[in-house]
Image (cartoon, coloured by chain):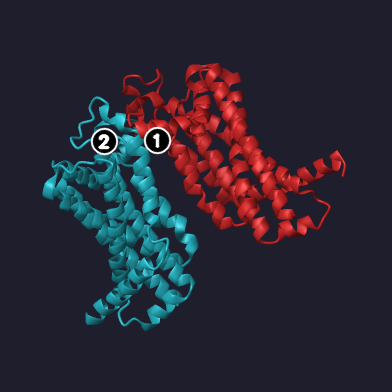
Amino acid sequence: MTGSSFLVQVVALARRSTVRTLRQPAVLISALLFPMMFFSINASGLDAASRLPGFPDAPYLDFAFAFPLVQASLFGAITAGSDLARDIENGFFDRLSLTPMRPAALLSGMLTGVVALGLIQGVVFLAFGLLMGVTISSGIPGMLVIVALTVLVALAFGGLGAMLAIRTGSVEAVESAFPLFFVAIFMSSINLPRNLIEQDWFRFIATVNPISYLVEGIRSLVITGWDAQALLLGFGCAAAIVVLAISGAAASMRTRVA
Amino acid sequence: MGSFFQVAWAVAGRQTYKYFTNPAFLAPALFPLFFFVAFAGGLTRVGDIPGFNYAAGYIAFQYVWALLQAVTMGGAFTGFSIASDFENGFARRLMLAASNRYGIILGYTLASIVRAFMTGALVTVLALVTGMPITGGFDFFGLIALAVLANIAATLFGAGIAMLLRTQQAGPVIRTPIFLVLFLAPVFVPLNLLTGWIETVARLNPFTAILDASRGFLAGDPQNVPQAFAISAALILILSFWAVFGLRQAEKAG
């Protein structure tokens, strides 16, 4: 098996994964519409929170902008994970394992689809945020970094979705993980800065929750400008989740095809 | 008239039995519980915003919203259950056997109230465990009454859609409008602290009056009570016609 044929396999499966997502308007609409809706409601409903002493010197709209980007990555992960689990459930995966196709190509193809969806979401949300009046302090280069971090976050969540799908082989199991991911997003610094979280137990969870650092990395580019520490932590956490999730997914894949 | 109540009682009994024998029977409470923990735990400082004058505190402020969310989502889940009954053929057999089909709607509604009591109790226990004070005394019963009316309204809405579409794919059509109505109200701060489009929408949203009055009951400072009960009654009346319309469409479809 040469490197180029592996690449051909990855491209073919990535194309299949992307086309399958694009052919499900309901999936695409919910992946784009719901995060935007929640963002609009949260940003308006919590606008008064920016009057709290110690709140960053920025409108709540800017503060909340990380929310749709992270939430959309979650939707993408669940969609991709469910698609992969469906492939296992309906026998596509087994048929594929009878061909010279390498299992790693299936995983890479699916994750390429996740990256493509993450890229679309990043660009759409950035445009939507700017239309709503979000100011990106780090300017155009910062916007590019926001999209890059969003794609990495999408890949991280996508890897987790893939691991779950391969390990369980059940669409229902992947779908039922949705509330857990959702809880993880809300139990972070997504709604208030960590120093303004009054309850000690909640602040502790938010501090150990890596999603806080993904959110704070994106947020720093929006409201602070260039904050090396926040960006290092954001990219570092995203990369660590990517490595762990993809390693876990690859190990599960080896077990499944063995 | 006797057959109306007989049918209602039979449907309510079956639904309640089905509810308690389903391992996932507390599922409608999961999201309200989670939102309560996330908002009451993570946003407590929001209660310190100048102009935030709710005597019972932020945990109680969020509890009322979580409780109303739990009971209305309980109504939505009853809608899913009706849609499932149509998909598996039970509802058609039920309509053939029922001597008074309007009793079917009442039966599902009664079962939904039982469901709402369970999910509401779960949210209340969690709120009490996390330190929520009940400063309203007997006014708390006013809150329970409004929660029951909200559950009935949501059930009738869900029943209408479920009978009209008769497929489990109706789930998002039932859930999304209820979710929107819940979120387009003063969820995080009182109405006087909302600004912009959300303030306009929240003022127009009939659920805002119910939410405000419910919060007033819990704090021992009932406000706009006649308005909240009048809106609840009007919603139930309108949505009763909606549910009957759904039933007639299901009858026509055979």
- Mark number for residue B198? none
Hey, what amino acid is under mark 1? Asn
Residue pointed to by mark 1: A42
Q: Is residue A165 left or right of residue B221?
A: right
Q: Residues within 10 Å of mark 2 (few under 14, many from 20)?
A: many
Q: Do the residues indicated by labels 2 and 1 lie within the same chain of the protein? A: no
Q: Is residue A258 left or right of residue B243?
A: right
Q: Is residue A253 above or below residue B88?
A: above
Q: Quadrant of the N terminus of chain A?
A: top right
Q: Position of residue B120 (x, y in %)?
A: 28, 54
- Residue occupying image coordinates x 30% and y 60%: B239
- Residue occupying image coordinates x 47% and y 20%: A223
- Mark number for residue B58? 2
Q: The chain coloured cyan carries which letter?
A: B
Hey, what amino acid is under mark 2? Tyr
Looking at the picture, tell me which residue is in the foreground, B253 or B112.
Answer: B112
Element class at badge 1: helix
Q: Position of residue B49 (x, y in %)?
A: 27, 26
Q: Is residue A20 left or right of residue B197?
A: right
- Residue occupying image coordinates x 33% and y 61%: B155
The image quadrant that residue A171 belongs to is bottom right
Q: Quadrant of the C terminus of chain A?
A: bottom right
Letter of the chain that mark 1 sits on in the rendering: A
Q: Position of residue A170 (x, y in %)?
A: 60, 57
Q: The chain coloured red carries which letter?
A: A
